[in-house]
């Protein structure tokens, strides 16, 4: 089964980074309409994910090229609740795959791993 655990982050708790930085998601950052849309986008992207790669400071997810606008909308909403993530979307030429990389400061990878069971 293909999954994209990073798309289901809904933690209210905090996780301490090695350098003392704490990461905490604010699920109340979205209004009710945004939360419903976020959940729809999450479901769509979870089923569309073709590959997951571990990176030195996070994770990368390969998606079909047709997912570009969906990923962009999801990132816009995800940034509201988890502003400590760095998002990089890379669309390959000639209808190649779309990669979404979710990274951050030291300790964010451990946060993602703990929250998503990776």
Image (cartoon, helix red, strand yellow):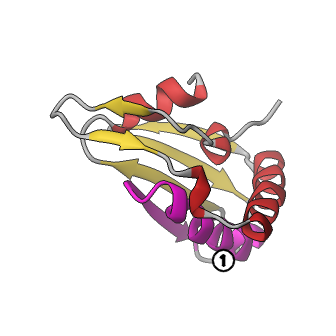
In reply to whether residue 45 is colored magenta, the answer given is: no
The x and y percentages for residue 68 are 68, 73
Give the crowd class for mark 1: few <14, some 14-19, many >=20 residues within 10 Å: few
As drawn, 111 above or below 104? above
- Comparing 21 with 66, the one in front is 21
Residue located at (83% from left, 50% from top):
43
Residue 57 visible here: no
The x and y percentages for residue 11 are 57, 37
Residue located at (73% from left, 68% from top):
34
Which range is magenta? 66-92
As drawn, 28 above or below 105? below
Q: Tell me if 49 is positioned left or right of 14 in this view.
A: right
Q: Quadrant of residue 76?
A: bottom right
Residue located at (83% from left, 29% from top):
1
Q: Tell me if 38 is positioned left or right of 18 in this view.
A: right
The x and y percentages for residue 109 are 39, 35
Residue located at (60% from left, 56% from top):
28
Q: Quadrant of residue 4?
A: top right
Count all numbered tags in the image, as a single digit: 1
- Comparing 110 with 25, the one in front is 25
Q: Quadrant of the C terminus?
A: top right
Residue 16 visible here: yes
Residue sticking out furthest to the left: 19
- Comparing 18 with 32, the one in front is 32
Q: Tell me if 98 is positioned left or right of 39 in this view.
A: left
The x and y percentages for residue 29 are 56, 62
Secondary structure at badge 1 equals loop
Q: Which residue is mark 1?
A: 94
């Amino acid at each position: 089964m293909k999954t994209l655990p990073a798309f289901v982050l809904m933690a209210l708790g905090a996780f301490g980074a090695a350098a003392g930085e704490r990461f905490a998601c604010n699920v109340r950052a979205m209004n009710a309409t945004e939360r419903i849309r976020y959940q729809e986008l999450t479901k769509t992207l979870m089923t569309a994910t073709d590959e997951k790669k571990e990176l030195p400071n996070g994770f990368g997810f390969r998606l079909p090229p047709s997912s570009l606008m969906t990923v962009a909308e999801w990132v816009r909403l995800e940034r509201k609740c988890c502003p400590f993530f760095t998002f990089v979307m890379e669309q390959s030429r000639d209808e190649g795959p779309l990669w979404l990389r979710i990274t951050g400061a030291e300790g964010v990878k451990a946060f993602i791993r703990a929250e998503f069971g990776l």
